Amino acid sequence: MIQIFNSTLEVSTRLLLQLYVHAQEPLEKETLLSLDFLTIYGKHYQILQDNLNGDSPSIKAEIQQKRADIKKLYLSELVKNGFAKVVNLPTGYGYQITSSGVLFCQSLSSDYMHDYLSNAQIVSEKVRSLSTSDIQKVAFELGDNL
Amino acid sequence: MSTMWLEKLVAYGHNGKTPLVSTVSFARHFTMIEGPSDSGKSLIYKSIDYLLGKKLGKTKEEKMLENGTAEEKSSAKDNPFSPLFPNGTCYDSLELTLNLDGDSFTLTRPFNSKKTNVEFLLVAGEKEGHYSLKEIDSLLLRRLGMETGLQIPKSKAGKMQALTWRSAKRYFLFSQGIIANENSILLPLQNTEKTASLSILLYLLGRKDFNEFNGEEAIKKHTRAVEVQAYLSGKVVSTAKEKEDLEAKLKANGLDPEDLGKLNATLQGMQDSLNEITDEFNSSIDTLQKINEDLANLEDSKTQEEINLVGYKKLKTQFDEDIERLGFIVNAGDVLAQAPTVRKCSFCGSEIHSPAGDAKDQQQRIESAQAELDKTLLQSNTLVLEINSATERLSKYDSDIEKKNLEKDSITDRLNKKLQPAKSDFEFKISQIQSYLDLKSQIGAIERQTKDIDADKKVYNPDDVKLVDYQPKGLFSKQFFEDLEQIFLSLLKEMKYQPLESCHFNPYSFNMELNGVDISKSHGEGYAGLLNATLALALYKASKKVDGAHFPGLLILDSPLKSLSLPEGTEKENDLRLHFYQTISKEAGDGQIILLDNAREAESLGVDETVDGVEVIRFTQKQDNGRYGFLEGVRKN
């Protein structure tokens, strides 16, 4: 059976939208996944009004799934398609959206895309003062206690 | 006539070393025991009285006569069982030998025992036995020919009591207190005992019975009639009050007590109307109950529908979110499909060709997402239809509930504002009429009861009970009073008593009047004792003339002249005391008189001791000079 939700296409597109929101700064893979999680489940963290993917009955299972997603090659797909590029960082490497990626994002037209971008902007504002490790901690560790 | 005379009195005791025995023997006809005060004369009298049945302690009469000092009273109180002998005399029992119609009996009775029921020892010949006071009393009555258990009247109305020897002996034994008092010696001091004493005297003077004066039954009947009358009178009053109250209640309710037929018809009509209203009331209650059940069902269905609708809406939200998300995926896939298939490597700039399998796989994913999107859209549309349907049903429930509530309010309103008040009104009116009918019935009962009470009052009328009117003084024969007057007068003449103008026995005061004055009063100090003693002697003599009399021929007088002092140098011819002793010593006849008095020797010389059956015993209160006193070994002080 073909997986539709949380498929590589869906997740990588959302991560590209995150890179689109943070176009001026390269982001590590863990930070990208954390921001994506906060954006779709922001209601649980009292950051957003609604959860974009609905009210999950088991947020813990979602967190476990998201940790497993780190090992998946969502970003390499983006890089392979030319929508993102790998950037060296003092702590290792990160990802940054390319002009093709920007064009791709601007070509998207669904309501979900607009809602996601809007939520991602709000999350970005909320976590602006936090370090990348703090963002991961908020998304995964605090999430365990929900 | 049976006779009784005393032979000997003996006091027994023990001083710790030797037995004590004090004896006084009495002459057959006259014995005078003379001696100074405290030589034991009155002790002899008291001993005889005690042996003839007097109870220990003082009689009511003695207490009335008593004028002893506080110390004496206190002593008597401290020693209630030894009032006979002074403390320290060491004597503890008495013995009396008496002769009854020729048979000699010896009665022994202890007197210092604290037992309340002191027994007598009776020796008759070789036989002896112990007897109680009551048994001795009966024995003496029997031996003297008197009836035991005879009922004698003790009140004007004819209340009865049994005749006893103990109460009869007051007419043979006259104590110093009785002789010296200012009332008739023939009547007791207590008014309550006078009737009984007169009954005894009547019996002693020959009356056989008092059956015609037995008023016990009449008294019982009268008492019962008075009680019944009082009860009935109270009942009439309370019944009349009850009737009055009931009638007032009827009038207060505006009811005419007389028109019973109309009232019953009205009652029936009201009862029918009440039944109709009650039926309608009950029917409305049933309808209300059904509406409430319907309402409960509607509310349940509505609640269930609301729960369903919430679930539907939640599912619809999920569908909407999935549709958006699937739209996002399809859109992303579409855009990606239009992107250039040849890409440059970000590191080296060389062209990258995607494998053909990747493109195919990607296309399949997009198609699946599109299919899922279509399917979800279809489900979402179906769900919308169901939501609309549920919403309509909810609206219908609300509408039905509102209708039922309106119906309920209407019925409740009718129940509360019309049916219930009408029902209560009828019930109240019916209860009023029923109460009235009950009251009417009660009044009927009360009227019947009142008639019964009136009838009963006639039956139980105390005035119809004939009470006995016992007047003992009127039962004495005129002849007896005349004999008594004549004997009394002749005795005084023999005593040379002066003046002797008239003598009359007053049947009302029941005393002799000398020269128009009661003998117990106003004859000078000491004369009352002499005159009272003379009356006792006259009674002793008069009784001998009465056929069937029960006097035993015995007279004992204690110190009759104790208070009679004559002037110094009174000549022998005028010595009333001497003449009294001389006279009485001759009057014993075939009976026995015992006189105890504080006489001077010269006075007692008037007694002729040479006559058979006459003796003078002198107590000198002197050592080695005659007999000191009654009790051997006991000295004054």
Image (cartoon, coloured by chain):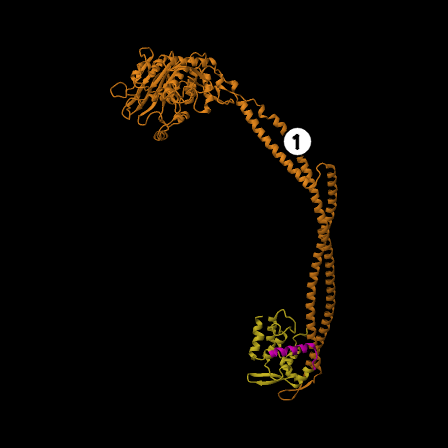
Chain colours: A yellow, B orange
Figure quadrant of residue B510: top left
Q: Residue pushed farthest bottom?
A: B349
Whether residue B238 is visible to the viewer of this picture, yes or no, is: yes
Figure quadrant of residue B485: top left
Whether residue B552 is visible to the viewer of this picture, yes or no, is: no
Above or below residue B139? Residue B411 is: below
Residue B9 highlighted magenta (yes or no): no
Give the crowd class for mark 1: few <14, some 14-19, many >=20 residues within 10 Å: few
Image position, residue B74 (x, y; %): 36, 31
Residue A118 highlighted magenta (yes or no): yes
Q: Number of numbered discs present? A: 1
Q: What kind of element bears circle 1?
A: helix
Of helix, strand and loop, which mostly describes the magenta segment? Answer: helix
> In this image, B446 relative to B501: left or right?
right
Above or below residue B566? Residue B239 is: below
Callout 1, which amino acid?
Arg
Q: Which residue is mark 1?
A: B448
Image position, residue B336 (x, y; %): 69, 81
Q: Residue pushed farthest left?
A: B624
> In this image, B199 relative to B72: left or right?
right
Figure quadrant of residue B241: top right
> In this image, B633 relative to B258: left or right?
left
Above or below residue B324? Residue B516 is: above
- B338 or B513: nearer the viewer: B513
Q: Which residues are magenta?
A: A107-125
